[in-house]
């Protein structure tokens, strides 16, 4: 087999494996979020977090993709955001927050393994995400 065909075959195999891996993450989270969205849990979360979400110019249900992203990853956040009717500015704000503070449990464990304080690492990322969220939300509030 020539190099071109081998490269195409290897790339296709890796692409399918990546797609399956992403589907294993996104589909269950999407199902849980849809359940939460239509259950009594959602109004409870919205009521509790609505005041805090105002700092980011987000509605109360903005907490769902934020928590999901901080505990899992960006792909799960995308799946969660697709179940809500966020504006472009709100999507950008959520994305920026989650890009700064995503996969906290996993990445804190990794940080600890390389000798960093997991607690300090987590606090730094969350505070950085809050600062970024306030700034990006403020810009989105000016535009929107």
Image (cartoon, rainbow, N blue to C red):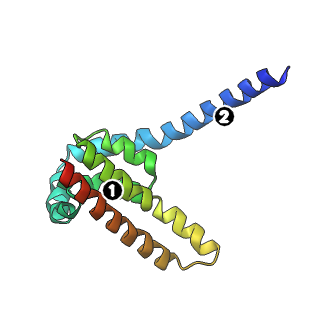
Viewer-side residue, 139 vs 72: 139
- Quick one: 45 or 114, which is closer to the camera? 114
Label located before the other in sequence (2 or 1): 2
Q: Where is residue 84 in the image (x, y as percent from the top left)?
A: 24, 41
Q: Would you place residue 122 above or below residue 88 in this image?
A: below
On the image, numbered disc 2 is attached to which residue? 14
Location of the N terminus (image quadrant): top right
Residue occupying the point 34% across, 58% down: 67
In the picture, measured across the screen, residue 30 lies left or right of residue 13, that is: left
At x 42%, y 75%, the residue is: 123
| x and y percentages locating residue 72 in the rendered image | 45, 55
Q: Residue at x 43, y 61 (%)?
A: 100
- Judging from the image, what secondary structure is the residue with disc 1 in? helix
Where residue 43 appears, x then y in whole percent? 15, 53
Asked whether the residues under the numbered discs 2 and 1 touch, taking CB atoms below 8 Å apart as contact, a structural biologist would say no
Q: Position of residue 14 (x, y in %)?
A: 66, 34
Can residue 61 be spotted in the picture?
no
**Helix or strand or loop: what does disc 2 sit on?**
helix
Mark 1 lies on residue: 66
């Amino acid at each position: 087999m020539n190099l071109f065909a081998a490269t195409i075959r290897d790339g296709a195999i890796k692409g399918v494996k990546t797609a399956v891996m992403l589907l294993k993450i996104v589909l269950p989270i999407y199902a849980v979020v849809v359940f939460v969205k239509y259950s009594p849990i959602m109004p409870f979360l919205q009521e509790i977090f609505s005041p805090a979400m105002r700092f980011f110019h987000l509605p109360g249900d903005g907490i769902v993709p934020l928590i999901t992203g901080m505990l899992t990853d960006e792909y799960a956040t995308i799946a969660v955001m697709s179940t809500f009717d966020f504006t472009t500015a709100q999507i950008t704000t959520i994305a920026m927050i989650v890009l700064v503070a995503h996969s906290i449990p996993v990445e804190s464990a990794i940080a600890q393994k390389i000798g960093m304080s997991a607690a300090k690492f987590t606090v730094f990322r969350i505070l950085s995400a809050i600062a970024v969220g306030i700034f990006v939300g403020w810009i989105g509030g000016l535009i929107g």
